[in-house]
Amino acid sequence: MNVSRAFVRAANTSATRVTIARRAAAQPAIRSYATPASTVDTKPPVALYGLDGTYASALYTAAVKSQSLETVAKALSSLQEVYVKDPKLSNIMQAPTLTTEDKSAIIAELQKHTGGQDKADTVKNFLNTLAENNRLALLEGVCTKFGELMGAARGEIELTVTSASPLDNKTLNRLESAVAKSQYVGQGKKLKVTNKVNSDILGGLVVEIGDRTIDLSVSSRISKMNKLLTDTL
């Protein structure tokens, strides 16, 4: 059963609302997902911007302090998959009419999808923090930004190759090998390759390496040619 359907069922059951309200009253305080400082470097590997980036960075620090970074990463990856499988969830999270009981019901359902990975309750407490601050709508973005932090911590660089049609593994491997030897990838870095399909580029490739973009698409060439002709006439 998807999260949105389960949430609606729970929200319509008065007994469930009462139980959840009692549990919500016993939840930890807003900042309880953070643990006492340790000697380990808890600073996120890269600076992120936006509210979702701020929350993702705070969660990263809390996860390092509680020695649960990898388990938190897996839990958030699982939550991100929930959004993919349940498109209605995003709209529910953004609803301005959510009550405290509604938010607690959502959190209870989301926890079922973390696979029991959150032993230190870091994710659970973080979800409560988002709920108490009326920021549950940020969760999807936080999951994405946290993935970026983990990639940076592991020395990964995103290599996104956009093509008009799907590329076979042989072609992707050749591109990965070529980019790995280029000036765009530092020593000891690992490439995380993704192939996106966009028929609008007509042909060729658009290669994104980290924050750099190399546009080798047919549509780009046509655009440049049209501009050249326009400027000439």
Image (cartoon, grey):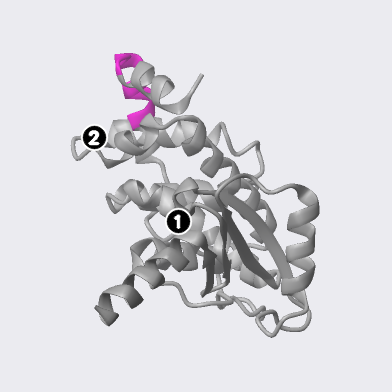
Q: Is residue 117 above or below residue 144?
A: above
Q: Residue 17 lies in magenta, yes or no?
A: yes
Disc number for residue 142:
1
Mark 2 Cα shell of 10 Å, populated few (<14), some (14-19), many (≥20):
few
In terms of depth relative to the viewer, which is nearer, 168 or 20?
168
- Residue 89 visible at all: yes
- Depicted 5 relative to depicted 86: above or below: above
Picture coordinates of residue 33, whole percent (x, y): 49, 58
Q: Which mark is residue 99?
A: 2
In the figure, 198 relative to 8: above or below?
Answer: below
Q: Secondary structure at mark 2?
A: loop
For label 1, the SS is helix
Q: Is residue 34 left or right of residue 30?
A: right
Q: Nearer the viewer, mark 1 or mark 2?
A: 1
Which residue does the image show at 34% across and 68% down from the upper left? 226
Which one is earlier in the sequence, the residue at label 1 or at label 2?
Answer: 2
Cα distance in 3D space between marks 1 and 2: 22 Å
Q: Disc 1 marks which amino acid?
A: Val
Q: Which residues are magenta?
A: 12-21
Quarter in which the C terminus is drawn: bottom left
Amino acid type of disc 2?
Thr
Q: Identify which residue is drawn at 37% across, 56% down.
A: 30
Dot 1 surroundings within 10 Å: few (below 14), some, or many (20 or more)?
Answer: many
